[in-house]
Structure formats: C-alpha cells, structure tokens
C-alpha cells in the first residue's frame, strides 16, 4: 500500500484586518517542525532548514498591501486606516505572497508588516519581534552587517516597549523583555546597556516565574565577567 506524503505547507484562509477581503496565506504544519536548539536571543534552530516557520509569520493582503501577524490587534485608532491607505495601499502593486517563500520574500513581508504596524500604532513589542525575526533571517544567511542593523532596531523597540509597559498582557514577561534588551545589547556591542539589564534580570530572580531566563542571564553575566578578566590580564 502506497503512503501519501503530506506536504508541510498548507493554505490558510485569512480576512484582511484593513479592507476585509478574503485571501490565502501559506503556513507550515506544526507537526512538521522540529526544533533542535535555540540561540541565546531565542532564535529557534530547526532540523530541516528548508522548512522555516519564521518565513510565514506575516500575512500580506494582495488586495490592499496591508501586512499583519497574529499579534496585531483588530482595533484601528481614528485616522490610522487613512494613513495606511495613503502610505501603503495607494502605492501597492497587487501581488501574492502565497506559496513557498524565499528569504527575500520573507524579509519583504516583515518590512511591509512593520510599516503597517507603524501606521496602525501597534505595540512596540510587536514591531520589535518582527525586526528581530528579520535579524534572524540575515543570521541564517551569514549577513552580519544587516543582522546587526536589525538587532539594533529591535533592541531599541524593546526598550520602548519596556519603558511604556506595552508587554503587559502578552506572552512576554517583564523578565523576558529585560533579558532580550540585555542580550541584543550584548550582541550589538552596547556593553553598558547589556550589563545594566542582565543585572536587573538577575535581581528579579526571587519574584520571577522565568527560571530558565534567569539562568540564561546568569550564564551571560559570567561570560562578560570572564571576558573582562581576560582583557585585564592582557593589559
């Protein structure tokens, strides 16, 4: 008896938050995704590099060009729909982002979603997550200059999210947001900001519900101290 191989990709029907048109976007079946590890900034590392769910987080409406993720709120503040119409839809050349995406298409989808989120006044946390995923795609591509650029944009947005508290009520805890600020600061060589935030994370250990993140911060803190000791020894 022949077994039918099920494609890891499937089409999901979407309703555009902006223009209310129906369209299809491509997703990956969760049972086809296997994570073998994570980078210290939470980037998942998949066994099969050809099947990367990060490429498919963003849905792009072929009708109006509005791009969004599951993290977008359905509410539009007064005047924001008009801003999107003027700045995105008016310049939009109708095209589909359905089907298997290249790295370039995935990055373009995230950039469209960032623009949409900016005009819609989405949470800084949501925008930070999208910029971080662009950095991850560039890391996979070993494009260090562009990875660093988007890590910095993401870090700055996470700082805004933390200062405004717009992570409250999301899956990102205070500990996790502070950790990612510290980790991204370390990666972009902003040592002062990294040290300040790793310290803050470790200070929350008695009241935090994120023991894994606390341990990650402690490990990083030890690396920083070891590195500083080595630098002093050379001097």
Image (cartoon, helix red, strand yellow):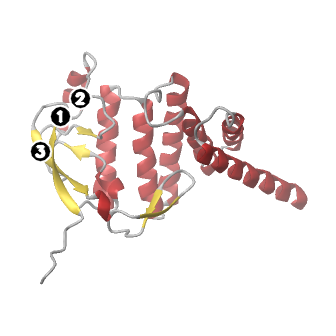
Image coordinates for residue 94, horizontal then vertical, percent: 12, 45
Tags 1 and 2 touching, CB below 8 Å: yes
Residue 76 lies in quadrant:
top left
Q: Nearer the viewer, residue 90 or 9?
A: 9
Q: Residue at x 23, y 45 (%)?
A: 59
Image coordinates for residue 52, horizontal then vertical, percent: 34, 61
Q: Which residue is mark 2?
A: 84
Quadrant containing the C terminus in the rendered view: bottom right
Q: CA distance from mark 3 to mark 2?
A: 19 Å
Q: Residue at x 71, y 41 (%)?
A: 195
Q: Is residue 39 above or below residue 112?
A: below
Helix, strand or loop under label 1: helix
Q: Nearer the viewer, residue 192 or 11?
A: 11
Image coordinates for residue 165, horizontal then vertical, percent: 51, 24
Q: Nearer the viewer, mark 3 or mark 2?
A: 3
Name the N-terminal-most of marks 1 and 2: 2
């Amino acid at each position: 008896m022949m077994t039918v191989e099920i494609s890891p990709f499937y089409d999901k029907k979407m309703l555009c938050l902006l223009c209310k048109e129906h369209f299809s976007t491509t997703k990956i079946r969760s049972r086809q995704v296997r994570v073998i590890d994570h980078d210290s900034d939470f980037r998942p590392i998949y066994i099969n590099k050809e099947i990367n769910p990060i490429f498919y987080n963003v849905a792009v409406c072929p009708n109006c060009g509005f791009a969004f993720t599951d993290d977008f709120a359905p509410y539009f503040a007064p005047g924001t729909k008009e801003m999107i119409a003027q700045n995105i839809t008016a310049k939009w050349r109708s095209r589909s982002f359905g089907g298997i995406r290249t790295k370039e298409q995935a990055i373009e989808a995230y950039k469209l979603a960032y623009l949409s989120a900016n005009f819609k006044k989405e949470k800084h946390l949501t925008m930070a997550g999208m910029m971080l995923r662009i950095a991850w795609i560039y890391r996979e591509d070993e494009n260090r200059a562009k990875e660093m650029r988007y890590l910095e944009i993401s870090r700055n947005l996470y700082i805004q999210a933390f200062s405004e508290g717009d992570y409250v009520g999301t899956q990102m805890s205070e500990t996790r947001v502070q950790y990612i600020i510290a980790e991204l600061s370390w990666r972009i060589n902003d040592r002062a900001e990294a040290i300040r935030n790793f310290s803050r994370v470790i200070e929350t250990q008695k009241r935090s519900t994120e023991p894994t993140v606390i341990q990650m911060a402690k490990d990083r803190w030890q690396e920083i101290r070891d590195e500083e000791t080595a630098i002093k020894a050379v001097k």
